[in-house]
Image (spheres, rainbow, N blue to C red):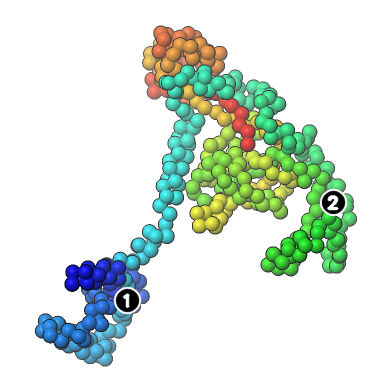
Amino acid sequence: MEEESEDVTEEAREKPKKLIKRVPVGMNSYTAAWIPDVEEVDDEDESEEGSSDDDDDFMSCASEVDSNAEMEDEGSQNGDDEGYQEITEEEGVSDVAKYDNEMDFEEEKRSLEKMKAARTDKLWPDEIDTPQDIPVRLRYQKYRGLESFRTSPWDTEKNLPSDYSRIYNFENFRNRARFELKEAENVLGVPAGLYVTVHIKGVQQSLWEAFSSAQDHENFILYGLLPHEHKMSLVNCVLRRTPESEIPIESKERLIIQCGYRRFITNPIFSEHTHGNKFKFEKFFQPNEIVVASFYAPIQYPPATVMCFRPNPDSSVSLVAAGSLLTCDPNRVVLKRIRLSGHPLKIYKDFAVIRFMFFNCEDVNYYKPIKLRTKCGRMGHIRESLGTHGHMKCRFDGQLKSYDTVYLQLYKRIFF
């Protein structure tokens, strides 16, 4: 008997109860959940009602239900039930539960962390905490200082990755693109409205049959390539975020790029869209911003439209940015900037004692030739080290404010 009772209770737990609600017409199940007059109906109890004739309480309840049903029928005949409807749903399976089941909570957490990191980068761009367990000159040995970001030279042929030996480099891309497009206009093509026969060489008959059978339609597109468009290079595109896209896009994030008639998956790096021979690396592609995306791709000539898509967790894609092709130039110098920050300890006229930028005197002497900048626009340089814990005496072109922040900026070239 105990085993049978346990089986009955388990079945009752597994089988959800049905809820019947009498609500006004047009109200959905989510809104109806706030109405308290709910009648619970169990299918097993309904099937066993006829066999339990010995229960007097049940008979009395049944008689009350019958009387109420008769009253409801009379009311319905009199028009009292006009504008009402009955909604039946399973207990515990509401619209809120269905919404939670369809939502990817882990993806929501990742998006939140990315938005926090993007906001921090926007408020304090490129600022880092000075490491205390390792000397700065060893931790950031690949970085170097610049007298001026705009005018200081940078060797474009130094420390290139091995992939740069396999890509094509134009001597002057803009002149070459202008020449190739002008030559293409002079080539006589097929006039519109004529039927032509295309012969494909070097393709086996079995491969062609497999390709044609895999297509959903009989039509396919043929296009010709201009000179050098079959070669690989570093493509730079100008992109602007769409108004609907609000989540920041991180550099080297997996994206789908539609560049002209080609589509490929890549992980681009972003840089600012300005004039000059050096461009600052952007860690995040913020909403309502314009950046330049750089990635390896086949060569194309502008003008060519570019669309950027982001893959969603449900295997769909969403448009996040659009723009146009800029250049195919591997010599575009993208520099990543870091800022070591310090704070004034003592201020006397144009001299100040700065702390928290370094934590040993060797680092102070190593970075002494690099110019200092402050948040309020002052310029200065390191004079000497004070003690052995990283304090340093600096001189600026004016008196510092007590709330000012001193920066030492270092740069490193970023490759795709």
Is label 1 in a helix, a strand or a loop? strand
Q: Residues within 10 Å of mark 2 (few under 14, many from 20)?
A: few
Q: Nearer the viewer, residue 297 or 350?
A: 297
Q: Is residue 109 above or below residue 10?
A: above
Q: Nearer the viewer, residue 48 or 81?
A: 48
Q: Quadrant of residue 390?
A: top left
Which residue type carries mark 1? Ile
Q: Quadrant of the C terminus?
A: top right
**Residue 171 has which mark?**
none
Q: Is residue 32 above or below residue 179?
A: below
Q: Is residue 394 above or below residue 176?
A: above
Q: Is residue 161 left or right of residue 73?
A: right
Residue 48 position within the rendered picture, expressed as x and y whole percent measured from the top left: 22, 82
Q: Give the mark, 1 or 2, whose residue is nearer the N terminus.
A: 1
Q: Residue at image x 56%, y 51%?
A: 310
According to the picture, the residue beneath numbered tag 2 turns out to be 185
Q: Quadrant of residue 371?
A: top right
Is label 2 in a helix, a strand or a loop? helix
Q: Nearer the viewer, residue 103 or 28?
A: 103
According to the picture, the residue beneath numbered tag 1 turns out to be 87
